């Protein structure tokens, strides 16, 4: 009874349970946690508001972990997970705040309009999206075995998988390109090296001219011959690529 009277005398606005459910679905758990915590503050329950933020952050971490675990070709999780946590948020609001919200309605209390709900939802969505991309990028860097070594004054780069080829071998390749003029002081070049058996496959970015200009192709052929002379025990193969390392337009071996 005392709690109801306190709510009746309160002039603070709160968020409706349906607004919290929709906002959580669209803006993610951070948006839902914000709305629930704000309601607890309006009901003069600051400790519950703090606990809400703790549970919200933990829930967000768990959801991110589940999202990373779902196969990339699975579409069901994209809809099921938001539905699950949005309805969970709705249940929690009804369970822990339902009586207070009902008393607030009976007392003629006011609710925040949908404009404010939309703004907070967008902020929550952008925050979750940014955090997701940061984590994706960090996870990719951690899980990737790709290493980059720098050579020459430009400087130029050699990209390689450290589980596929040793840094000592890459150093010899880098020095070979310095000696043969590819890694000079004027132009920065990034090549990608992969070892297959005793052969070195080297992907070198170029433009479309290599497909139609025999002189350009001949220059790369001479470069490959110069590199081959430095590696008599290893076959040197050039993959000339355009725009993407997988887009091989010419192979010289």
Image (cartoon, grey):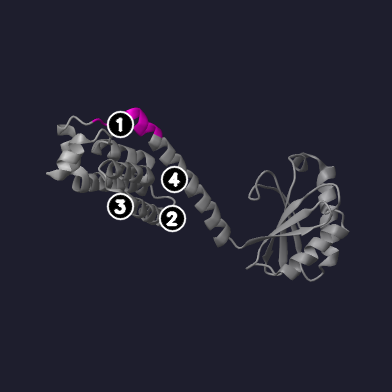
Mark seen at residue 47: 3
Mark 4 sits on what residue?
128
Image quadrant of residue 58? Answer: bottom left
Q: Residues within 10 Å of mark 4 (few under 14, many from 20)?
A: some
Mark 2 sits on what residue?
68
Q: Earlier in the sequence, mark 4 or mark 3?
A: 3
Q: Is residue 115 magenta?
A: yes
- Which residue does the image show at 85% across and 47% down from the upper left? 186
State which quarter of the image contains the N terminus: top left
Q: Residues within 10 Å of mark 1 (few under 14, many from 20)?
A: few
| Residue found at the very far left of the displayed protein | 1
Front of the two marks 4 and 3 = 3
What type of secondary structure mainly makes up the magenta span? Answer: helix
Residues at discs 4 and 3 in contact (Cβ within 8 Å): no
> 181 or 107, which is in the foreground?
107
Front of the two marks 1 and 4 = 1
Q: Residues within 10 Å of mark 3 (few under 14, many from 20)?
A: few
- Across and down, in percent, residue 154 comes to 82, 51
Q: Earlier in the sequence, mark 3 or mark 1?
A: 3
């Amino acid at each position: 009874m005392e709690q109801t009277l306190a709510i009746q005398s309160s002039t603070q606005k709160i968020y409706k349970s349906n607004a919290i459910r929709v906002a959580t679905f669209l803006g993610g758990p951070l948006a839902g946690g914000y709305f629930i915590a704000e309601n607890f503050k309006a009901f003069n329950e600051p400790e519950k508001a703090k606990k809400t933020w703790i549970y919200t952050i933990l829930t967000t971490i768990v959801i991110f972990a589940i999202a990373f675990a779902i196969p990339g070709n699975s579409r069901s999780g994209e809809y099921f997970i938001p539905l699950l946590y949005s309805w969970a948020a709705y249940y929690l609001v009804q369970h822990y705040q339902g009586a207070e919200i009902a008393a607030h309605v009976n007392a003629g209390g006011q609710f925040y309009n949908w404009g404010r709900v939309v703004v907070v939802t967008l902020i929550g969505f952008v925050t979750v999206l940014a955090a997701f991309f940061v984590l994706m990028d960090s996870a990719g860097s951690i899980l990737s075995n790709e290493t980059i070594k720098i050579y020459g004054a430009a400087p130029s780069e050699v990209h390689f998988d450290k589980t596929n080829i040793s840094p000592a071998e890459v150093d010899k390749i880098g020095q070979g390109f310095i000696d043969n003029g590819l890694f000079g002081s004027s132009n920065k070049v990034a090549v990608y090296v992969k070892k297959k058996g005793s052969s070195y496959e080297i992907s070198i970015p170029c433009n479309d001219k290599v497909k139609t200009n025999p002189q350009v192709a001949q220059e790369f052929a001479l470069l490959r011959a110069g590199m081959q002379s430095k590696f008599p025990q290893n076959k040197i193969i050039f993959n000339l690529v355009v725009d993407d390392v997988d887009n091989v337009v010419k192979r010289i071996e």
